[in-house]
Amino acid sequence: MDDMYRDYILDHYKNPRNQGELAGATNTYADSNPLCGDELTMALRIEDERVADVRFTGKGCAISQASASILTEEIKGKTLDEIKAIDRDHILENLGIPISPARIKCALLSLKTLKGAAWGLPAWPGEDEAKARSAG
Amino acid sequence: MAVTVKSPSQQRSPLDVARIRADFPILSRTVNGKTVVYLDNAATSQKPRQVIDAMSAVFEEYNANIHRGVYEFSETTTAAFEGARAKVAKFIGAKDDREVIFVRNATEGVNLVAYTWGRDNIKTGDRIISTVLEHHSDFVPWQQLAKDVGAQIVMIDVDEDGRLRRDQLSAELKKGAKLLAITHTSNGLGTVNPIKEIVAEAHAAGATVLVDAAQAVPHTPVDVADLDCDFLVFSGHKMLAPPGSGAVWARMALLERMRPFLFGGDMISRVTVEKTEWNELPWKFEAGTSSYADAIGLGAAVDYLEAVGVAKIHEHELSLVAYLLPRLTEVSGVTIYGPKTLDDRVGVVSFNIEGIHPHDVATIFDREGVCVRAGHHCNQLLMTRLGVAATTRASFYLYNTTDECDALLGAIDKAKKVFKV
């Protein structure tokens, strides 16, 4: 537990990097975890197939917000192909803390919004059906 | 924040909690090296040995399908199943056992009513009155029905203490309504609505009343004859019984006029290629093989609750609220949602800690062995009304103690230390 809320996680939660609106954003994607109320919007400015700049806005638990903060630090300057290659294990490795099964969705919301933005998606494929299934 | 509580001497628990706890095997288990402190009873309750044994006995001693075999096992299972129905009927004050329909849970109960009575009686332009206190189980079925038939959903708000706005309800009832679908007790805040008065008012306005009693039947005496409602639904798993058990209660006259919900085996009396005649009540509404072991478990749970006394359980839970509320109020950064007094409430305490998301709170609590719910509690309308995405909720039952309240308070301290707030 104390492992889960390490200082750098709490630091990213309380002092998020790259948080705010992005002027001139070319790609934006918003999503949420309805069960816990985590919300994230990822905004990218893509120039020459590269992330020239990134900002995120959102609210939610320490894990979801710290995950977004850490991810945005990493992706600046990366190519779209590099971003599309980032996977779940990479995110969990970045966080560097044990994430319990119930909190995986919190940790991965950043990845989902980043991918949505990078692929230029208006909504996640199959989202409506998935939301309908999970509505509780 | 003003918290009105009676003095501790007036709020002593009437229960022998140590003796009760000995009946619940799970309560002596450890989580993360600490004896579990189970404070998520509004989500589901733990089960006493008596219920576990009653269900084991089904499979170890006499299991056979109900209402079918003409041999001893089937007759024993059928008698136990119908015996459970009689216990439930008596427990909620039903005049006739046949008024109790076994369903899997309160959600299925509301759907049963929505798909049968609802579809035959609610028409285009009709008004359905709901409240922001409703669990999704008593809102979404009506919302969807309203969409399908072109009816209108009218929402009733709560005041700052999470009490239903009776003035709004009265005003809306005066405008007319086909149905009032209302919770007896809020799962999110613990508010108890004055259902008897509300039913009388709704009936005077010509509305039919469905009462969601999922949080009421386990915690307070509920008597359908006294409430005079039309439909009442509840789940077994919140009242010491297994998941998969629950009931819909409605008056015989109403049930007789209703068409069946699900079609198939057991709910018929005669089938020909041209047509099917329905079985008698209550089986008309129980298609397919019922979850009879779960229903038998529910019967055993009712026996247990009656032996302890539901009124005493309610008093016990209030004694825990009386202990916790003033202490919780003194913790800096804690916001409590819902009623701040002991009147018309049950043992549900919803709160947030400033600067810590409820999911982080619950994760840290888990390390301390404290189980609470963090989230929207299937109460998104209420969360929106409160202006929060989620809350942390502690909810009591007959086996909880003031020591466990202290463990909760200790876990809050721990969370604040971890987050340095």
Image (spheres, helix red, strand yellow):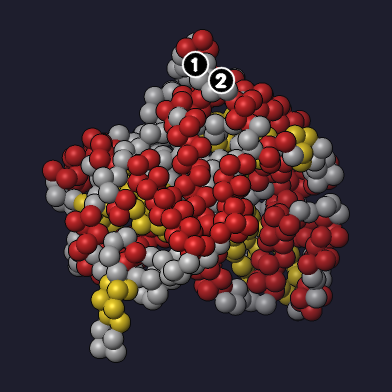
Asked if A58 appears above or below B391 in the picture, the reply is below
Residue B197: image location, x then y, percent: 23, 35
**Which residue is at the front of the view, B419 or B405?**
B405
The three-letter amino acid code for the residue at tag 2 is: Tyr
| Front of the two marks 2 and 1 | 1
Which residue matches tag 1?
B11
Which residue matches tag 2?
B323
SS for dot 2 = helix
Position of B209 with respect to A71 (left or right) is: left
Residue at figure coordinates x 68%, y 41% from the top left: B26
Q: Which chain is home to disc 1?
A: B
Asked if B133 appears above or below B2 in the picture, the reply is below
User: Quick one: quadrant of the C terminus of chain B?
Assistant: top right
Residue B258: image location, x then y, percent: 24, 64
**Which residue is at the front of the view, B150 or B36?**
B36
Cα–Cα gap, marks 2 and 1 = 9 Å
Mark 2 / mark 1, whichever is N-terminal: 1
Position of B290 with respect to B177 (left or right) is: right
SS for dot 1 = helix
The three-letter amino acid code for the residue at tag 1 is: Gln
The picture quadrant where one finds residue A117 is bottom right
Residue B117: image location, x then y, percent: 25, 63
- The furthest residue to the bottom: B273
Q: Are marks 2 and 1 in contact (CB under 8 Å)?
A: yes
Q: Looking at the picture, do discs 2 and 1 lie on one chain?
A: yes
**Which residue is at the front of the view, B387 or B261?**
B261
Q: Which chain is home to disc 2?
A: B
Residue at figure coordinates x 54%, y 43% from the top left: B240
The picture quadrant where one finds residue B264 is bottom left
Residue at figure coordinates x 75%, y 68% from the top left: A52
- Circle 1 crowding by C-alpha within 10 Å: few under 14, some 14–19, many from 20: some
Q: Does the rendering let one see residue B330?
A: yes
